[in-house]
Image (cartoon, rainbow, N blue to C red):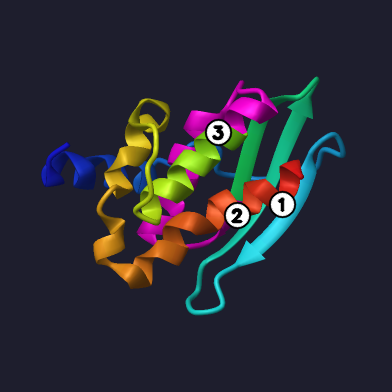
Amino acid sequence: MDKETKRAIILDHFQHPIGQGLFNDDSYKKVNINNESCIDEINMMVKLENGIIKDVRFAGEACAICTSSTSIMIKLLLNKTLAEAQEIMLDFENMINEKPYNKETLKEALVYDELYKQPNRIKCALLPWECIKKVIK
């Protein structure tokens, strides 16, 4: 994927994020996470039904990398089983940490395949993934 395509995907998910906005519903599991080194803070709510991620919503204050990563993650994980979601999450973490990963599972998340070149942005991209891991444990 070329740099311009990556930028366009990140910008689109930042400007029009999937799953933005919270509401009151006790059937959702809720969690909050923040990045100690910057402003990124995410409140997330996840609806699980029979071991399947049915909905993910979020709100908070976050940079373009964190917001777009959250949106892309939601798109990837919706309607996945917990086992499928954990495989995708592991592949994402491995990609970010320059370890072997399955490109097939990551789709648009591949926009972050060179994020290791900007170490100060790694936590921004990983924050929503850490948040959803807390929810599904």
Query: What number of labels is visible?
Result: 3
Distance (Cα) linking label 3 and label 1: 15 Å
Q: Position of residue 76 (x, y in %)?
A: 49, 30
Residue 48 drawn at (x, y percent):
76, 29
**Residue 66 coordinates in the image, percent (x, y):** 44, 57
Q: For the residue marked with disc 1, what is the amino acid?
A: Lys
Q: Secondary structure at mark 2?
A: helix
**Residue positioned most to the bottom:** 37
Residue range highlighted in magenta: 59-85
Say what secondary structure mark 3 lies in: helix
Q: Amino acid at mark 3?
A: Glu
Decide if residue 77 is in sight here: yes
Q: Nearer the viewer, residue 122 or 45?
A: 122
Q: Which quadrant holds residue 92?
A: top left
Name the residue tied to disc 2.
130
C-alpha separation, residue under disc 1 versus residue under disc 2: 6 Å
Residue 104 located left or right of residue 48: left
Residue at 53% from the left image edge and 41% from the top image edge = 89
Q: Residue at x 28, y 67 (%)?
A: 118
Q: Which residue is mark 1?
A: 134
Which one is earlier in the sequence, the residue at label 2 or at label 3?
3
- Magenta-colored stretch includes residue 81: yes
